[in-house]
Image: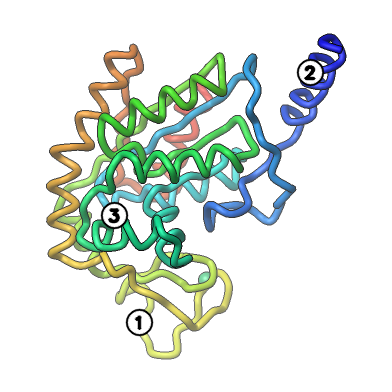
Amino acid sequence: MRFLSTFISVIFLFIVGCKQLNTPNVSSHSTSNQNQAVNISKKDSKCCVVILVGLPGSGKGTHSEYLCKKLGFTYFSMGEALRQEIASGSELGKKVKPIYNAGKLVPDEAADQIMQKFFSTMSSNKLLFDGFPRMVPQAKLLHSSLKKIFVDMNIKVLLLDISEDIAKERVVERFFCKECKAIYTEKTMPFKNFRCKRCGSIEFIKRTDDNAAIFAERVKVYKNETLPVLDFYKELGISYHVIDTSLSVEEVSKKIEKIILKN
Ligand SMILES: [Zn+2]
């Protein structure tokens, strides 16, 4: 009986390993290849984890999208998961809404609940974390959760480097296509009946937290709470890579891809 269940587990892992799956409900970055989620809850498996750190406006979303599409990563953004939770009107969503809208960090317990929700639906062993963990306690939670699932972890931490002024300008001016989440600014969508270049939609939204006051709060949190996360990983023997984001999107993407594909 024990042999049989082990055998089934091995077959299961083999099937999971052969598929390039994406998580269906966590992000706009999942591709059209939306296979049914398979719950990876087996030990003896390997994973590749990419953690993108950077100020709001540093291009984390843009590069995440590229990596998910090109390299088959499953995407997780705490910000996006929180916005979904708030939009759903759940108890958790109601609890975190005022905290999120003020640009502050949600309590560890709420962050953990959202993260566990992601782990229960993730369907790939290539995981991309966009702007998460935002603080050391979250990094500890994430690390221990990953260790429970995967035995062999290849973790890459990437710091998307950008000046505060440029980041602020990008954040305050940006709009998102309501359909495909493509990012535009007032300069790149210059006329009234502008259509999204990617999907043709004419509806655009502005995130409620994309304003100068909230940006300043998020920068404060970033400096005080998020940058120490880099030291947490360093202590685990995982050095972070600094990526200069003043280059073109293509050049930055290529640099990121090279780091991820190395060993
Ligand atoms: Zn669009």
181 on left or right of 30? left
103 on left or right of 109? left
Q: Position of residue 211 (x, y in %)?
A: 20, 67
Element type at mark 1: loop
Quadrant location, the N terminus: top right
Mark-to-mark CA distance, 1 and 3:
20 Å
Element type at mark 2: helix
Foreground tag (1 vs 3): 3
Q: Which residue is mark 1?
A: 190
Q: Which residue is mark 2?
A: 10
Give the crowd class for mark 1: few <14, some 14-19, many >=20 residues within 10 Å.
few
Dividing the picture into quarters, in which one does residue 216 lie? bottom left
Give the crowd class for mark 2: few <14, some 14-19, many >=20 residues within 10 Å.
some
> CB of mark 2 within 8 Å of CB of mark 1?
no
- Amino acid on which the number 2 mark rests in the picture: Val
Q: Is residue 113 above or below residue 40?
A: below
Dividing the picture into quarters, in which one does residue 138 lie? top left
Q: Which residue is mark 3?
A: 57
Element type at mark 3: loop
Q: Position of residue 174 (x, y in %)?
A: 31, 68
